[in-house]
Image: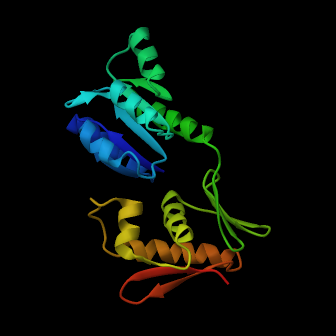
C-alpha cells in the first residue's frame, strides 16, 4: 500500500516508516499540516494522521480535506483517549481512531480493515488483470500471487501501458524519493514481475527501454 504518514514527532514518524516499510508498504512522511495538504491529493491507499500538528489541528485539517472531496481512508492517531474526543475525530471524517501508545500489530490490523472496506479496483491491460485487493495478477484462468513491491511495480506499468516508464519514476513511486538502498532494486523487481508474467503465459511483456527504463507491451 501507499501510505501517507502525517506525524510531527520524529521518533514516532521513524517507527511508523520503518515498521510499515518492513511490511512491504511504501511510506511517505509529512511533519506539518502544510506539507500534508501539499501531498494529500496524491494516490494514497490510506492516510495516518496525527491529531496534534505544529501548524494546525488534525481534526480541523481532516474536515477541510473531506469538504474538498478527499475519499482516502484516514486513521487518526492521538494521545487523547476520551470518548468525546474520539467522537470528534470520527465526525470530522476519520475512518478509524487509535490512541497512543498502541501495539504495532493492532495498527496493521486496523490498516488492513480500512483498505478492505474500499471498493476493489481491477486494472486491465489486454488479457492481464491486476487485482489490488487480492494482491495477484490474472490472465484467463491463470493466477499468480504478487508481493507488495511486485504489485506496486506492475501497477505503475499497467497504468502506463505502452509508455516508457523511467527507473527513477518506478523508484519514487514504489520505494519513495528518500530510498537509499541498492541501486539495482528496480531491475531486480522488474525481473521478478517478468517471471510472474511468464507463469501467466505472457499476457503482456515488459521490454527494456535502453537508457530510460521499461515499457509494458500488450499483444
Of 99 and 22, the residue lying toward us: 99
**Residue 98 lies in quadrant:** top left
Q: Please tell me which residue lies in front, 173 or 11.
A: 173
Residue 14 visible, this orientation? no
Q: Is residue 204 left or right of residue 77?
A: right
Outermost residue toward the right in this view: 141
- Which quadrant holds residue 53? top left
Residue lying furthest bottom: 210
Write the residue at 44% across / 24% down.
92
**How far across and how far down the image is residue 121, in percent?**
63, 53
Give residue 55's position: percent from left, percent from top. 20, 31
Q: Position of residue 47 (x, y in %)?
A: 42, 40
From what the image shows, is residue 160 above or below residue 59?
A: below
In the picture provided, is 128 more to the left or to the right than 174?
right
In-image side of 11 versus 146 (left or right): left
Q: How many marks?
A: 0
Would residue 183 be seen by someone viewing this image from the given angle?
yes
Q: Where is the C terminus found, in terms of image quarters?
A: bottom right
The residue drawn where x is 59% and y is 77% is 195
Is 43 situated above or below 137? Answer: above
- x then y, percent, for residue 173: 40, 62
- Residue drawn 54% across and 64% down? 155
- In the image, taking residue 217 as reference, residue 200 lies left or right, namely right
Q: Identify which residue is drawn at 33% across, 46% down.
A: 17
Task: Tell me where residue 37 sits by quadrant.
Answer: top left
* Colour option used: rainbow
Amino acid at each position: 500500500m501507499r501510505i501517507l504518514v502525517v506525524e510531527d514527532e520524529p521518533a514516532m514518524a521513524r517507527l511508523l516508516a520503518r515498521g510499515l516499510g518492513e511490511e512491504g508498504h511504501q511510506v511517505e512522511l509529512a511533519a506539518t499540516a502544510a506539507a500534508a495538504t501539499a501531498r494529500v491529493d496524491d494516490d494514497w491507499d490510506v492516510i495516518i494522521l496525527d491529531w496534534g500538528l505544529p501548524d494546525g489541528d488534525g481534526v480541523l485539517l481532516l474536515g477541510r480535506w473531506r469538504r474538498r472531496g478527499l475519499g482516502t481512508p484516514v486513521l487518526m492517531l492521538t494521545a487523547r483517549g476520551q470518548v468525546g474526543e474520539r467522537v470528534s475525530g470520527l465526525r470530522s471524517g476519520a475512518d478509524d481512531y487509535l490512541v497512543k501508545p498502541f501495539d504495532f500489530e493492532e495498527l496493521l490490523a486496523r490498516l488492513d480493515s480500512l483498505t478492505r472496506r474500499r471498493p476493489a479496483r481491477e486494472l486491465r491491460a489486454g488479457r492481464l488483470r491486476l487485482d489490488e485487493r487480492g494482491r495477484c495478477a490474472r490472465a484467463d484462468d491463470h493466477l499468480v500471487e504478487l508481493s507488495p513491491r511486485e504489485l506496486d511495480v506492475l501497477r505503475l506499468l499497467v497504468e502506463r501501458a505502452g509508455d516508457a516508464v523511467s527507473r527513477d519514476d518506478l523508484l519514487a513511486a514504489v520505494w519513495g524519493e528518500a530510498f537509499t538502498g541498492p541501486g539495482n532494486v528496480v531491475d531486480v523487481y522488474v525481473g521478478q514481475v517478468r517471471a510472474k508474467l511468464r507463469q501467466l503465459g505472457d499476457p503482456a511483456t515488459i521490454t527494456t527501454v535502453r537508457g530510460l527504463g521499461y515499457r509494458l507491451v500488450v499483444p
